[in-house]
Image (cartoon, helix red, strand yellow):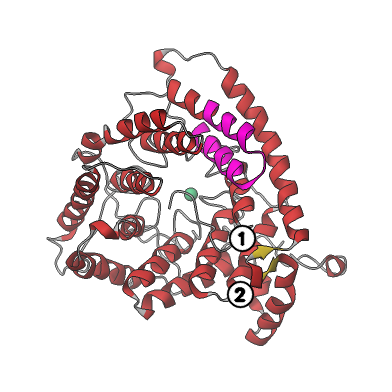
Amino acid sequence: MVDKKKSDQKKPEQTKPEPSRHYTNELCELSPEKADEVVGRSLKLYYMVDKFKTTQTFENKLNEFVEANMHILSQQVKLFLKKPKPKEHELTVESVYSGMAGIALLYNFYASKTNNKNKTREKAKQIIEKCIAVLDDKSNSVTYLTGKSGIYVTATEIYKDMGDLDNARKMIEKIVGLLSLALNEKMPDVLFYGRAGYLYSLLLLKKIGWEDPERDRLIRSVVTTIFNNGIRTCVKDKPRKTSLMYKWHNKKYLGAAQGLSGILHCLLLAKTYVTKKELDDLIKPALDYLLTLRYKSGNLPSSLCNDPDTLVQWCHGAPGVSHTYALAYKIFRDEKYLNAAEQYADVVWKRGLLTKGYGLCHGVSGNTYTFMTLYQLTGKSKYLYRAARFIDWCLTTDRQNKIPDQPYSLFEGISGVTYALLDVQNPALANFPGF
Ligand SMILES: [Zn+2]
């Protein structure tokens, strides 16, 4: 992350590995004056700020990696499409998070961003149809990221983009058909594995044009259940510190994927279905409570179980929760939420160059989105600069300590990085997928 000429003279600025989970970002040691000067000078290498566009040089660099990654992924797609139909006990949920549905989503996104529309979208359709063909119907997972609704919503989007409204409608029926499972008392509430993830699918479906007289009642029923469970979990606490709390495997998690902030995020996304009283008496006190739990460093613990201050990744800690406070600020217009979003983003700048690698969930491309969201919210060029530096860092491929469990996937592997490389080319609209 230094100018080429300088890198010959001294060690790159972020190569010092730490025993913890991140590399040192020495750029954040700069004085405010020096930092402003660096932003002013270096941002021009990446973005034409007045046009909300990447420079041609940066665009070429990003797309070179996009094309290389798409080529690698095409080999995986070929293998997947060739696989014979599995026997009943071998059926799977090829999820958006770690399975082939995430790759179908990327293919459809790539189609929308490039001139290669028909061919890539056709491939996206083939992948998602195979995901549905091998889907384990007995699975109880209804969420967007790891469950069936994510596969069906992705299929709906692809069919809609191809003008195949009949098949899109069939997918919507399948998602609606998961409602009783989503409302079942055994279903957890968390985004990653539970009800909030199903709510996210319904909201996404609405965004892509789902019309139904029952739609609003259905979405509200999910919101109500999430509120009721959140109240029940903390109503007997003495003293009562929060208005809402949730458990996952008996632990009170706080982060985006499995915790309170991720659920609050989905409820804020569903604000049309939330009353003013619920916003003020349930969501706001829970957001305020979360602010009291921060470590001295400014990071958010993973749970209420005295976890060490190590995780700065979308799923746990500052990067995910920064998005939630940015959203809260848009709704409540309370300065303390804006300050919180910015303070969390500072933690990401300092500790977000992760040794784990480049993925969306717990990698550097995911952390890049924190800065994109803050840039969209505040218009401050330092956030665009930080996003550019982080995504550029992902293009240096020798800083990953561990191969992810699912190296081709959307949330752990190169599909997610590719998604981010395409997305940062449109900084006004870039948006973390699934959140
Ligand atoms: Zn993660």
Name the mark nearer the viewer: 2 or 1: 2
Q: Which residue is label 2 attached to?
A: 382
| Above or below, 432 relative to 130 | below
Q: Nearer the viewer, residue 64 or 18?
A: 64
Where is the N terminus found, in terms of image quarters?
Answer: bottom right
In the displayed structure, does residue 385 sit left or right of residue 126?
right
Is residue 405 at least partly visible in the picture? Answer: no
Q: Can you give x and y, in whole percent of width and height, for residue 263 in the image?
A: 32, 55
For residue 122: magenta? yes
Query: In the rendering, at what x and y percent does residue 193 appear?
Result: 35, 42
Disc 1 residue type (three-letter): Leu
Q: Report which residue position mark 1 lands on.
A: 353
Secondary structure mainly formed by the magenta segment = helix
Query: Looking at this view, is 363 or 55 the one in front?
Result: 55
Q: Position of residue 420 (x, y in %)?
A: 59, 52
Q: Is residue 372 above or below residue 226?
A: below
Span colored in magenta: 98-126
Q: Is residue 118 magenta?
A: yes
Name the residue rendered at 21%, 38% in the picture.
186
**Crowd class of label 2 (few under 14; some 14 to 19; many from 20; radius 10 Å):** some
Q: Amino acid at mark 2?
A: Lys
- Report the Cα–Cα distance between label 2 and label 1: 17 Å
Is residue 428 in view from this perspective? yes
Q: Nearer the viewer, residue 31 or 335?
A: 335
Q: Residue furthest bottom?
A: 33
Q: Which is more toward the observer, 372 or 55?
A: 55
Left or right: residue 282 versus residue 59 is left
Q: Which type of secondary structure does the marked residue at label 1 adopt?
A: loop
Identity of the residue drawn at 22% across and 70% down: 280
| Res. 405 image quadrant | top right
